[in-house]
Every structure is written in structure tokens, then in C-alpha cells.
Image: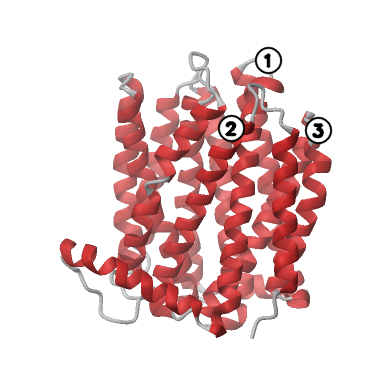
């Protein structure tokens, strides 16, 4: 099979394997850390989380990414990406340890959120750098299959990290502190794994510069404007439309995630512990959908083209999401978790490929930072909309139907585009 042959070839590439190892450890640690935060904020027995509280937490953690994201791109196009992985993961390990101390000491919520924000802010640099570095270790012919394998296995690693967090939490008698320390250890491992890559291997090509902070701040607007102009060129129209479509799909995913959190916390489970286990099962099935997307997308993208594949994923979501979501029952929701995992990751693989192939290497860091900003704004916006629409138990047919309409608009728009 061509897919199996391509996977074997990718695995034979030493630098690709090492970059993939950094991604797996880093995103595995993300999964552990994020589940620890969710357990502490949403599923702690002493906390009565509402949709508004969940949306507020997402805003605190994600909206500042919109400020960090542009600077990440500017600096990524000047710094050696390998060094970003080494020092970024080391910094996250230290900050995660600080978060564990704050949980143990019952610190004020604002201080806890500030610590968590610092961990996730550094994450913007690492993930954007991983996407920008991938074309440096894989030839253009196999970039689609590399985009299927690398980000998808990273997402699976995050899912596995979430499962590990649940297991550690059970073994540690519900201690969120122990879970956060486990994430800190994985961040440290990712930093050490980055040392196996040569400093100049991952680019960028021009000589790395360490600009003064004032100069970096002053130049950010011009740098981002250049990246946007780069995307706005007629020959990059398809990349711009793919980014817009993926942003809306991220909005849909965020709204459905808040709905799922509320259902697991109140409607589908009798206790917070049972709700957390149910959420873990849903995330596991979503991870299986990510894996299925890695298998299906290269085949589908070759035959339909990446843009049409994104349109097909959106059309499938438009039909299946209300069919599985409106019963608000455990079985259909578990099936929906798998389907949305497959659809969302399949569209993301195609979007990443379109963007990577459509922009020049010197702009990739900035473009992927804009990509991250759009992701976070859409996610927080979705959480805010969900907070306004969701009842206390999370059952909202209106929200489910609204998401289906958005998926339908994405599918129709992409199907009608005629790129130059």
C-alpha cells in the first residue's frame, strides 16, 4: 500500500524521527497538564462549575495567546527552532512545578490561572515551531503524509497524556498536584530529547538574530502585515480560505467541548469522579478518530484535493453532529466524539498542508502564529457563545443546530471556491 510505504520511508528519516519524538513528549505533557487543570477547575467536588465559569477560565488561559501569538511568529523566524524546543520545554517544566506548588498551597484562583497561563503561553512557541520545522526534515513530495503522521500522532500523544493523567489521579487518590508534577517531568524529557537535533537543522535559513525587546515590539505590526500580505496574494488564495474554514471549525469544536464538559459534569454522571471518567472515555474515542483521520486523509486528499476534503469533512459534520448530539445520550455522544475527532483532524491535516505548501519558509513562523491566534480567538468566542446558550445541565438543542449550520456554511463556501 502506498500509505504504508510512505510511512516506512518517513520513519527511516533520522531527523524526522527525532523531531517526532520531541512532538510526542511535548504534546503528551500538554495532555497531562490540561487534564489536571480541567480536573481541578471543573471536576473538583468543592467547585460548582457553570458554563460561564468554564468560559471565563478559557478566556483567561487562551485570549492572552492572541497577544503572545504574533510575537511567537516574529521571534520564530529569527531564533533557531531547535533552541526554542530545548528552552521552551525546560521553562514549561519549571512553570508546571510552580503550578503544582500553588495547588498544594490552596493559592488564590488568579495566581493559579496566571501560572497556568505562562505554561500554555510558551506552548504557542513550541507548537508553531514544530509546524514550521516539519518541511525542513521531509521532502515536499511526502509533506501530506508527514502532516498526517506528525500532528496526528502528537494529538494522540496528548490524548494518551490525558489518559495517563486520569490513571495517575486515580492512583494518587485524586491528587491534582501529583498529576501536574507528572506533566512537568514529561516537559523536561521533551527538552532533553530536543538536544539530539543539530542546532541549525530546523532553520530558519537566515542567520538567527537576537533582537532587542524594544525592536521586536516595534517591528511586530510590520512583520504581521507582511505575513498577511503574503497570504493575500492571489496565488495563495487557497491557503487563506483554508485558514478561514479551519477557524470556523475550531469555533464549532470549542462550543461542543463546553457542551460536553457540562453534560459530563451534571447531566450524564451522578458524581464529579464519574463525570471525569466519562470525559476521559470521550477524549479517548476522539483520539481514535484522530488516528483514523491520519489513515484516511492522505488517500482522500490525493483524490479530492485538500480543499475539497475539508469541504467534505464539514458536510459530514453538518449531518452527523445533530444526528448524534440531539439525543443527549451517552452512547450517541461517544460516537459523536469519534466522528468529530476524525472530521476535525482530517480538515486540520489538509489545512496544514495547504498552508505549508503555499507560504515561503521565511514566512511560515509568522503565518502559523496567525493561525494560532485565529484558533484561540475562535475557541474563546465559542466558549462565550456556549455560556450564553447552555442551560445548567448542558442540554441545548439550539447550540447543536447552530454548530451544524456553521459546518454547512463552511462546506458550501469551500465547494464554490475556484482557486487560481
Q: Earlier in the sequence, mark 1 or mark 2?
A: 1
Task: Report the front residue among 25 and 211.
Answer: 211
Classify mark 3: residues with Cα within 10 Å, few (<14), some (14-19) or many (20+): few
Q: Which residue, given by chain and number where applicable, does mark 2 sit on? A: 388
| Residue 170 picture location, percent across and down | 55, 23
The answer to whether the residues at label 3 and label 1 have Cβ atoms under 8 Å apart is no
Q: Which mark is residue 270?
A: 1
Quadrant assignment, res 33 = top left
Task: Report the front residue among 130 and 325.
Answer: 325
Measured Cα–Cα span from mark 1 to mark 2 = 24 Å
Q: Which residue, given by chain and number where applicable, does mark 3 sit on? A: 331
Measured Cα–Cα span from mark 3 to mark 2 = 26 Å
Query: Relative to residue 77, is residue 255 drawn left or right?
Result: right
Classify mark 1: residues with Cα within 10 Å, few (<14), some (14-19) or many (20+): few
How many numbered callouts? Answer: 3
Classify mark 2: residues with Cα within 10 Å, few (<14), some (14-19) or many (20+): few
Amino acid at each position: 500500500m502506498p500509505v504504508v510505504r510512505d510511512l516506512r520511508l518517513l520513519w527511516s528519516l533520522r531527523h524526522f524521527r527525532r523531531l517526532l519524538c520531541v512532538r510526542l513528549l511535548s504534546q503528551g505533557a500538554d495532555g497531562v497538564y490540561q487534564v489536571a487543570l480541567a480536573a481541578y477547575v471543573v471536576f473538583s467536588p468543592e467547585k460548582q462549575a457553570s458554563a460561564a465559569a468554564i468560559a471565563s477560565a478559557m478566556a483567561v488561559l487562551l485570549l492572552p495567546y492572541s497577544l503572545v501569538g504574533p510575537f511567537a511568529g516574529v521571534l520564530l523566524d529569527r531564533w533557531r527552532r531547535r533552541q526554542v524546543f530545548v528552552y521552551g520545554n525546560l521553562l514549561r517544566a519549571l512553570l508546571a512545578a510552580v503550578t503544582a506548588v500553588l495547588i498544594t498551597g490552596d493559592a488564590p484562583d488568579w495566581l493559579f490561572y496566571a501560572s497556568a497561563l505562562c505554561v500554555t503561553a510558551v506552548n504557542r512557541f513550541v507548537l508553531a515551531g514544530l509546524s514550521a520545522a516539519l518541511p525542513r526534515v521531509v521532502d515536499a513530495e511526502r509533506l501530506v503524509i508527514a502532516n498526517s503522521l506528525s500532528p496526528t500522532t502528537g494529538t494522540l500523544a496528548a490524548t494518551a497524556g490525558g489518559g495517563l493523567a486520569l490513571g495517575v489521579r486515580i492512583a494518587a487518590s485524586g491528587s491534582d498536584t501529583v498529576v501536574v508534577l507528572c506533566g512537568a517531568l514529561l516537559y523536561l524529557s521533551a527538552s532533553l530529547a530536543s538536544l539530539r537535533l543539530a542546532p541549525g537543522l530546523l532553520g530558519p535559513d537566515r542567520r538567527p538574530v537576537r533582537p532587542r525587546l524594544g525592536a521586536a515590539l516595534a517591528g511586530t505590526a510590520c512583520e504581521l502585515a507582511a505575513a498577511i500580505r503574503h497570504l493575500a496574494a492571489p496565488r495563495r488564495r487557497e491557503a487563506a480560505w483554508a485558514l478561514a474554514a479551519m477557524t470556523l471549525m475550531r469555533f464549532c469544536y470549542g462550543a461542543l467541548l463546553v457542551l460536553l464538559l457540562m453534560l459530563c459534569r451534571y447531566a450524564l454522571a451522578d458524581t464529579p469522579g464519574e463525570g471525569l471518567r466519562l470525559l476521559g472515555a470521550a477524549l479517548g474515542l476522539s483520539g481514535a478518530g484522530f488516528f483514523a483521520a491520519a489513515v484516511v486523509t492522505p488517500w482522500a486528499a490525493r483524490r479530492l484535493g485538500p480543499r475539497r476534503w475539508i469541504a467534505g469533512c464539514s458536510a459530514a459534520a453538518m449531518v452527523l453532529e445533530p444526528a448524534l448530539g440531539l439525543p443527549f445520550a451517552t452512547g450517541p455522544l461517544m460516537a459523536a466524539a469519534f466522528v468529530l475527532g476524525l472530521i476535525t483532524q482530517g480538515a486540520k491535516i489538509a489545512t496544514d498542508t495547504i498552508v505549508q505548501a503555499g507560504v515561503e519558509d521565511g514566512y511560515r513562523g509568522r503565518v502559523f502564529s496567525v493561525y494560532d491566534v485565529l484558533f484561540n480567538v475562535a475557541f474563546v468566542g465559542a466558549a462565550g457563545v456556549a455560556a450564553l446558550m447552555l442551560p445548567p445541565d448542558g442540554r441545548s438543542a439550539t447550540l447543536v443546530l447552530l454548530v451544524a449550520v456553521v459546518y454547512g456554511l463552511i462546506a458550501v463556501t469551500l465547494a464554490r471556491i475556484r482557486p487560481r
